[in-house]
Structures are given as C-alpha cells and as structure tokens.
Amino acid sequence: MIDNKMKAAILESPKNMRVGVVETPSPKEGEILLKVGACGVCGSDLRFFEHGDRIKKFPFVMGHEIAGTVVETGKNVENFRVGDRLAMGNEIPCRNCDECRKGLDMLCQNVISIGSTVPGGFAEYLLLQKEAVERGPINFMPKNLDFVEASFAEPLACVYNGMEFAGMREGKSVLVIGAGPIGNLMVNLAQVMGASNTVIVDKNEKRLGMSRPTGADNYIYDENNDFVEEAVKLTGGRGYDIVVSACSDIEAHRACTQAVAKGGFVNLFGGVPKGTDDVVSFSNNYMHYRQFAIGGSFSSTKEHHAKALEILARGKIKTKSIITHRMPLDDILKAFDVVKNREGLKVVVEP
C-alpha cells in the first residue's frame, strides 16, 4: 500500500530548504514510481541549494544520485515491473541531436536532468517520467549491492567518463588534486584500471587523513598549490601520465599543467564557482614541446553508469571508506552542512 502523502526535502528558494509532506505522485502512461532507497549528496546539489543555478522554478526537490525499488507502473511500461531494484544516472538525452548521435548523451542539446530540471530523489518516492523510462540512464541493480552502494554508481560513472576521456590504461601514473569523494573515486578507479602509481593532493589535512584507506601510493598535504615539485619528484622528474583536478580551485587547475608528463593528459574535472576567475593560463611553448593535452569531462552516459555498477558489484571500489555518512531524510540540512564544511567524504541520504 502506497501512502498518498510522502516526505520530501523541499527547496523553497536558494538557501531555504525544509522537509515537508507533499502528495505522492501517481504514474501515468509510460511512467514508473520509485521508492527511493538512497540518494547521494553531490557538490552540485550544494551549489543548487546555495544559488539555484539550473533550477528554474521553485519549490523544487533536488537529488540525482539515486537507487530504489519500482512500486508502481503506469500503462504500457514494458521494461520495468514492480519489485525491480534500479539505479540511475543523471542526464536524460533526446537521442536526436548531433551530440547524441555521436554517443555524447551527457552533452545533449535538449537534456533533461534529474534533480535540477525535473524533480529528484531527496524524497520518499520519485516519479520517473516517460522520457526517463524510455531514454534515461536507468540500470538494474546487481543483487549483491545495497541501495547506498548502488547510488554511488552515478558519481563513479562520471569518474569513469573522466578517466576514459583522459586515456587511462594499465601502467599509467595518475595524480589527483582534491581528496573529496570524487578525488578518492578517481584514485580508486585508476587503481582498478591498472595505474602504476597514484598520488592524491589536498590542502585539508583532516580530509587527506580520511582518504588514506583508499590506498593511494602517496599523499601530499599542500596549502598553497605548491605541490608540483614534490609530486613530480615522486616520478623521478618525469611527471604524470594523467593529472586530474578534482576540486574547484582555479590555482590548482593552473598548477596541474606543470605536473603532467610528456604526451600526458590534464583533466580539469572540477568546475569553479560562478562569478570567479575561471581562466586557466599556461605556457604555450611548454605545452607544445611536451605535447600534452588539456580537457574537461562532464557527467556520464547510460553505458558509463552500467560499467560503474559492474565495478561496484565486483567489490573493487572502497565504498565503506569513501561513504562516511549515511543520514535520514529528516537530517538533510545536516547532511548539506557536512558536505559544505568538508567534515566527511561521501554523504548519502536514506529516505
């Protein structure tokens, strides 16, 4: 029996969110209703909370790192049934634009984003509209994963896209700037993909300490983005095949170009706050004669998400170390404070 009322974290306006009771949505033709088992708190959720960003209409329910159980289906839903345990990515592509035809679903010109353009998973139930059911990055959960672990597939899928784009292969060395959940996932996934050497840098000594169970080969505490000399010394002066800036510090982005090896790749994965200087400067000749590439990566596809679930199911990601907080929906404001104040690594809400 599904209650006709449910709890949800309602964002009334930027910096104004409360847990309240709303109508439980009812699926129409082609739609499904999901009982949310877990929904992770992403850095973008904090940004939406603080500034609104992509959210055009309030009140709104955020949350896009979702796993749960199908409890009701509308008419003509063929691929899902009541009782299915599902996990999902964020971006619902149109499958018709130039980017979609190139396989770049996450860069779709007409993308629908769960938790920012349509309601998300910080609620007891989530209505997946027809577009999501037909085209969304929805995958069946492996039997050996719980909802919290499966919700972690969304950020891991984004990390997988970033590593794939950077050309990660067995034997490559990897330097990651930022010891948050994404930085730790970058290191952990690099290890899974056969990295020869992994190093993580952060200016928050406490957070760096929390990252040690991830098992990077070296950890560097650096307050002022002076990490390049120490980090490069660990490679015998060669630099790193892949350097990832998994933080929002523009100076760290700039420093990354000095730590990359000849023929390497710099992935500026972390966005910087709006209204700040986001120009990354570097020496043209240094880049030219060392023949390295600089790029950025964003979000993921359904295929990345499926791969992430597979890796999680194999027990290759140290979820128990990276997921530091599991909190009820009633404590969602506390959960956001933990993320904002960097008191843990990954925070997951369990409605």
Image: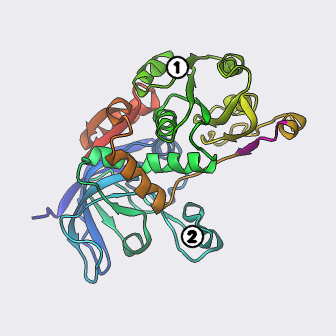
Residue appearing at x 45%, y 46% in the figure: 155
Amino acid at the residue labelled 1:
Asn
Q: Is residue 291 magenta?
A: yes
Coordinates of residue 350 in the picture (x, y in percent): 26, 44
**In the image, residue 241 lies at what x, y percent?**
67, 36
Q: Is residue 20 above or below residue 100?
A: above
Residue at disc 2, secondary structure: loop
Numbered circle sitting on residue 110: 2
Q: Name the residue that disc number 1 marks.
A: 204
Answer with left or right where residue 63 lies relative to residue 250: left
| Magenta stretch: includes residue 65 | no
Residue 230 shown left or right of residue 26 in the figure: right
Q: Where 283 falls versus 42 (above or below)?
A: above
Which region is colored magenta?
290-294
Label 1: element kind: loop
In the rendered image, the vertical position of residue 238 relative to residue 155, given as above or below: above
Q: Quadrant of the N terminus?
A: bottom left
**Residue at the spot 39% in from the left edge and 47% down from the top edge:** 311
Given residues 26 and 323, the one toward you in this image is 323
Query: Label 2 near label 1: C-beta < 8 Å?
Result: no
Q: Residue at the spot x=35%, y=29% of the render? A: 321
Residue 226, x across and y down, in percent: 69, 18
Say whether disc 1 or disc 2 marks the residue closer to the N-terminus: 2
Marks 1/2: CA distance?
38 Å
Q: Amino acid at mark 2?
A: Asn
* Residue 178, disc: none
